[in-house]
Amino acid sequence: MTKSLEIDISEVHTVVDRTEWARFMTDDEYYPYLVKKNLRPAIWRWEDLKPRLDEVLKDPLRRADRRFISLVNSDTGEAGGVFPSIFLGIQTFSPGEHIVPHRHNSYALYHVLQGEGYSVLDGQRFDWKTGDTFACPPMASHEHINTGDVAAIQYVIQDMPARAMDRNLIWEEPMGRVFHVVEGKMPHQDD
């Protein structure tokens, strides 16, 4: 007995025969295409960054927002990192502020430049102060609380550019609000 396969094609609006961006390349063409230009060394000066960090600290926190400045080497092109697969951000939050629980499928490595407080990672509390470093695994729920009397400043290293280039960067910010970056949804925007 053969089952008939019923397919709903009401969503099909175009039949694609060819795409101009699909290419054939010989190995002699492909290898030069694969090789990317070298990255130039880069430096970001604290004296240039600090005024911008102070300015973003005046912005209100929205949802699971963090106030941060991204360090970007333009040589990484659309990857938008300090290196093609590495994001480096410097985030800050005021005394008494709480970055609500959120998670993402990129890892996050934090180094505390200033301040004190604690972070809750998958239900475990990690107290931190100036000079400490802590790691947050991919998809771990995490939140940050500044218990000190100065703005907390943290370096944050993530593999966000690699995830975005692979078209699989996912955020849940705040918890319960999941979005996939490739779909064009970004933090701080309403659906």
Image (spheres, rainbow, N blue to C red):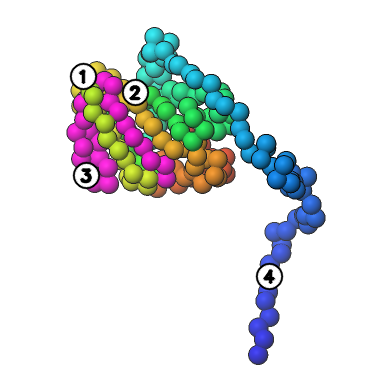
Q: Main secondary structure of the magenta part?
A: strand
What is the distance, in whole Å, between disc 4 and disc 1 at their CAs?
62 Å
Q: Earlier in the sequence, mark 3 or mark 2?
A: 2
In the structure shown, which secondary structural element does the residue marked by tag 2 occupy? strand
| Amino acid at the residue labelled 1 | Asp
In the structure shown, which secondary structural element does the residue marked by tag 4 occupy? loop
Q: Are marks 1 and 3 in contact (CB under 8 Å)?
A: no
What is the distance, in whole Å, between disc 4 and disc 2 at their CAs?
52 Å
Res. 124 mark: 3
Q: Residue at x 49, y 20 (%)?
A: 41
| Amino acid at the residue labelled 3 | Gln
- Mark 2: few/some/many CA within 10 Å (<14, 14-19, 20+): many
- Mark 1: few/some/many CA within 10 Å (<14, 14-19, 20+): few
| Amino acid at the residue labelled 4 | Ile
On screen, 34 above or below 12? Answer: above
Q: Earlier in the sequence, mark 4 or mark 3?
A: 4
Residue to which mark 2 is pinned: 92
Residue to which mark 1 is pinned: 149
Q: Residue at x 47, y 45 (%)?
A: 170
- Which quadrant would residue 167 be assigned to in this image? top right
Quadrant occupied by the N terminus? bottom right
Q: Residue at x 20, y 40 (%)?
A: 125
